[in-house]
Image (cartoon, rainbow, N blue to C red):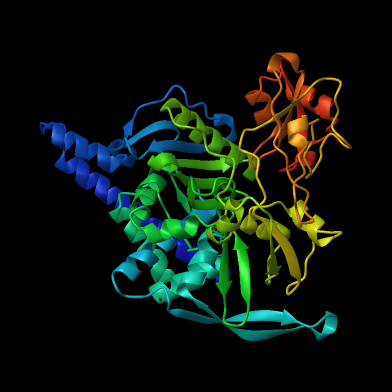
């Protein structure tokens, strides 16, 4: 009975929405008839009404080579020059999954600036939890209490559906009333290809009722959201702490580009359902030149991120800027130790929900190093455990590579996690170095003459794939890289590991 009522409710809403569009179109045609002369100003307003993308200047950049086969629709927008430089089906409406939460966040921030609510407000609700085993299972209601800022983080960073729904209830008073407000605000922004059926982006009973939008409409919404710095401050976090008063959890951003390119990629939102595919609205502000990339309907998160990264890099290169950097900036509280050039021993207490990757990101080191320093056999760590962390070690410059001749080999396996290859040093470099730290010193190497070398040793960076490495160094094909390094599949390619790259292959 409940499902029948729900379907009838959705049919009624869709009928009213279709009728509203028909009336608007009819009124527009009546106002601008074939017998009425059109001025240039009237013509532009008519285009803006029927096609929101008409208000954007589209100038194709020939240097942007996006893999169109890996997406259903998308675009790349240059905010500084106010133009779309690449697009595919940008006015086509597609399912958007959790990109829905962008509108939830936008309305929340609007109400905060209007003085209706505050970031520090406590949002309380009860959650049904199943406890017990087998026949003793029963449902217990437990109170939940988070600040509005924390559930905002959970919705936008970890894409938590419960947080988005509770935020909608708190801001709108009622979920359905808030959804109506979402659709109304979309119409006010001329997002005429957008429909919202819920505040989470979860699929409806039928594809026709799924939350949907077009890349052009999502661009309009993104531009509105960029007016509020606090949104970018949250969406640009690689990791964030949220607390319910009793426990603190660490959440990780589903948009991994914010982790790989911290300080450059600072938003905005990911989304996935089976019907929507993998979606991403990404914003980058490298060298204060902001770009907005939108991809809908990719086959996997890795392909989606690769397509977005390549688009951004192609256009940055086209306008004379560097590509997105491979290194994340160290947290401010470890910069002083790093600048000293000497290892500094610190201790970290593992929090609830933290893993080695999150801790390694926090201290600008690798998970393998943490395991070695603490003699850990596996990557599992219990909350409350004390870990030894060494900071301030000399890091290798981005892009600095070691070259070896064909006769030299890499110690151990072709993929060596951690540890640097130590070349033969000159007498001047053999001076004793006083060190009281158990950490092995990292020595910089002087690249050999490329003409006399057959291979280079490349340290895998975040976001690297065998294809991207082969393309960067003009390797004939990926199979050549696999054969040289005895790699059977791409899962063996780990960040921080070393591979041999044949030069002039």
Residue 471 horizontal/vertical position (percent): 64, 24
Residue 208 horizontal/vertical position (percent): 50, 51
Q: Quadrant of the N terminus?
A: bottom right
- The image quadrant that residue 333 belongs to is bottom right
From this view, report whether residue 294 is shown above or below residue 311.
below
Residue 357 horizontal/vertical position (percent): 69, 56
Is residue 327 shown left or right of residue 191?
A: right
24 and 275: which is toward the camera: 275
Residue 204 horizontal/vertical position (percent): 55, 58
Is residue 287 shown left or right of residue 485?
A: left
Is residue 128 shown left or right of residue 493?
A: left
Label count reads 0
Q: Residue at left 16%, top 32%?
A: 34
**Is residue 300 visible to us here?**
no
Q: Residue at left 79%, top 58%?
A: 373
313 and 143: which is toward the camera: 313
**Is residue 372 visible to us here?**
yes
Q: Residue at left 49%, top 56%?
A: 235
Q: Can you name the residue that lies furthest to the right here?
A: 412
Q: Quadrant of the C terminus?
A: top right
Is residue 237 shown left or right of residue 192?
A: right
From this view, report whether residue 239 is shown above or below residue 494.
below
191 and 234: which is toward the camera: 234
316 and 50: which is toward the camera: 316
């Amino acid at each position: 009975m409940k499902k029948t009522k729900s379907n009838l409710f959705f049919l009624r809403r869709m009928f009213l929405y279709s009728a509203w569009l028909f009336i608007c179109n009819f009124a527009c045609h009546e106002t601008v008839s074939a017998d009425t002369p059109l001025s240039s100003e009237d013509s532009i307003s008519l285009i803006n009404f029927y096609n929101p993308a008409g208000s954007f200047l589209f100038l194709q950049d020939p240097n942007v080579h996006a893999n169109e086969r890996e997406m259903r629709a998308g675009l790349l927008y240059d905010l500084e020059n106010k133009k779309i430089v690449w697009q595919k089906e940008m006015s086509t409406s597609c399912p958007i999954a959790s990109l829905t939460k962008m509108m939830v966040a936008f309305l929340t921030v609007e109400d905060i600036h209007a003085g209706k609510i505050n970031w520090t407000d406590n949002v309380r609700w009860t959650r049904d939890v199943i406890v017990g085993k087998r026949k003793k299972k029963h449902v217990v209601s437990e109170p939940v209490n988070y600040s509005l800022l924390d559930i905002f983080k959970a919705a936008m960073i970890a894409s938590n559906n419960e947080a988005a729904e509770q935020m909608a209830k708190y801001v709108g008073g009622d979920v359905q009333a808030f959804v109506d407000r979402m659709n109304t605000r979309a119409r006010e922004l001329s997002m005429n290809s957008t429909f919202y059926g819920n505040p989470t982006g979860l699929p409806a009973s039928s594809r026709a009722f799924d939350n949907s939008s077009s890349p052009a409409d999502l661009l309009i919404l993104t531009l509105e959201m960029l007016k509020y710095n606090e949104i970018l401050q949250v969406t640009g976090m690689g990791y964030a702490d949220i607390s319910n008063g009793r426990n603190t959890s660490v959440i990780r951003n589903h948009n991994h580009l914010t982790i790989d390119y911290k300080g450059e990629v600072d938003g905005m939102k990911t989304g996935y359902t089976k019907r929507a595919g993998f979606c991403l609205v990404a914003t980058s502000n490298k060298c204060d030149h902001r770009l907005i990339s939108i991809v809908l309907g990719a086959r996997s998160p890795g392909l989606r991120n690769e397509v977005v990264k390549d688009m951004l890099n192609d256009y940055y290169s086209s306008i004379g800027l560097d590509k997105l950097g491979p290194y994340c900036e160290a947290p401010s509280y470890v910069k002083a130790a790093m600048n000293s050039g000497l290892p500094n021993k610190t201790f970290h207490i593992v929090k609830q929900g933290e893993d080695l990757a999150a801790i390694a990101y926090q201290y600008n080191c690798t998970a393998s190093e943490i395991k070695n320093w603490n003699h850990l056999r596996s990557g599992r760590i219990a909350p409350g455990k004390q870990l030894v962390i060494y900071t301030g070690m000399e890091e290798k410059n981005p892009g600095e590579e070691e070259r070896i001749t064909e006769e030299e080999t890499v110690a151990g396996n072709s993929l060596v996690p951690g540890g640097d290859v130590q070349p033969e040093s000159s007498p001047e470099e053999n001076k004793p170095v006083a060190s009281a730290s158990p950490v092995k010193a990292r020595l910089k190497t002087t690249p050999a003459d490329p003409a006399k070398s057959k291979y280079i040793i490349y340290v895998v960076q975040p976001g690297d794939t065998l294809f991207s490495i082969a393309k960067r160094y003009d390797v004939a094909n990926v199979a050549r890289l696999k054969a040289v390094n005895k790699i059977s599949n791409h899962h063996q390619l780990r960040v921080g590991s070393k591979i041999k790259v044949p030069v002039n292959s």
